[in-house]
Image: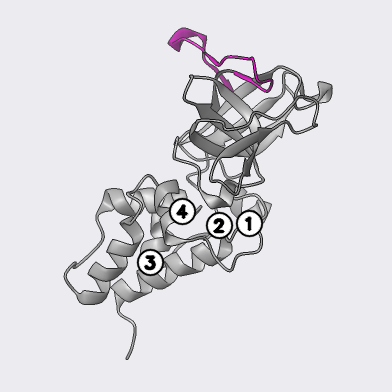
């Protein structure tokens, strides 16, 4: 039986899940992708059932937009397979020519504040009249922001560097394990750390240069992968 438009959307979601597979896995799970996209944990699974059964004629625009962000692509590609598939994911960067020619590419990125690389540092958000705007990294989107690193746990060479990430603030998903991320904790600290998932389900936060002791049993409320870094 030929695939209809609804089935094709599902096949493209599956294609992106495979492209974003965590180390040692064949694909990113529906649950992880849904949470990363800001949907409910069973959001993608429910969408599959609805489209397969014919109970849902199409996909809501806001759902499609969230899915595109979480899957590192665009709504146009998910819906019609038009334009570039890859916008930006570490290890899945489309050629520079495609990114430079993309009409929707960001021209500037806002520097939102300071962020701690050390365990003691506290996030400081700039006020509206203090915002600075800098040149964006490849594949920046409307959600991309920058923060300036304060503290030394990334290594002295990275002090005052700019760290770029997507300010979506989704719960930790398995594709972030072992990755350098901007991490928001329950005590309002926002740090730049590598996330380690422990067998008991807890999270340990590691410094990039192993300069500081790990933060064990960290109460992580949200995390976003670092997409780029550069000196100021």
Please name the residue that numbered disc 1 is placed on.
94
Which residue lies under the disc numbered 3? 80
Residue at the far left: name it. 55
Q: Is residue 17 left or right of residue 232?
A: left
Residue matched to label 4: 32
In primary-sequence order, the first of circles 1 and 3 is 3
Q: Position of residue 130 (x, y in %)?
A: 51, 9
Residue drawn at 52 percent across, 60 percent down: 28
Q: Give the spatial CA distance, label 4 vs label 2.
A: 19 Å
Residue 66 visible: yes
Whole-number angstrom distance, CA of label 1 to CA of label 2: 6 Å
Magenta segment, which residues?
Answer: 115-137
> What residue would you read off at disc 2?
86
Q: CA distance from mark 3 to mark 4?
A: 24 Å
Q: Tell me: residue 215, above or below residue 87.
A: above
Q: Is residue 114 above or below residue 154?
A: above
Q: Are marks 4 and 1 in contact (CB under 8 Å)?
A: no
Spatial CA span between label 3 and label 2: 14 Å
Task: Please rate how many residues cluster around mark 4, counting C-alpha atoms within 10 Å: few if below 14, some from 14 to 19, many from 20.
Answer: many
Q: Is residue 232 magenta?
A: no
Picture disc at residue 45? none
Could you tell me which quadrant the N terminus lies in?
A: bottom left
SS type, badge 3: helix
Q: Residue 80: x, y in percent?
A: 38, 66
The answer to whether marks 3 and 4 mark residues whose Cβ atoms lie closer than 8 Å is no
């Amino acid at each position: 039986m030929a695939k209809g438009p609804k089935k094709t959307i599902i096949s493209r979601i599956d294609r992106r899940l495979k492209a974003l597979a965590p180390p040692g896995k064949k694909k990113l799970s529906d649950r992880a992708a849904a949470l990363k996209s800001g949907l409910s944990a069973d959001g993608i699974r429910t969408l599959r059932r609805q489209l397969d059964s014919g109970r849902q004629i199409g996909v809501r625009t806001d759902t499609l937009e969230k899915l595109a962000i979480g899957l590192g692509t665009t709504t146009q590609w998910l819906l019609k397979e038009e334009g570039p598939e890859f916008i930006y994911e570490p290890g899945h960067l489309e050629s520079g020519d495609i990114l430079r020619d993309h009409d929707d590419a960001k021209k500037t990125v806002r520097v939102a504040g300071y962020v701690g690389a050390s365990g003691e540092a506290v996030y400081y958000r700039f006020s509206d009249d203090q915002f600075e705007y800098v040149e964006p990294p490849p594949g920046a989107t409307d959600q991309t922001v920058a923060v300036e690193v304060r503290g030394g746990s990334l290594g002295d060479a990275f002090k005052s560097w700019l760290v770029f990430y997507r300010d979506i603030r989704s719960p930790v998903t398995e594709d972030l394990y072992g990755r350098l991320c901007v991490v928001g904790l329950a005590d309002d600290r926002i740090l730049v750390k590598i996330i380690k998932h422990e067998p008991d389900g807890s999270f340990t936060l590691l410094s990039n240069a192993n300069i500081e002791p790990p933060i064990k049993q960290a109460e992580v409320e949200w995390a976003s992968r670092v997409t780029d870094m550069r000196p100021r």
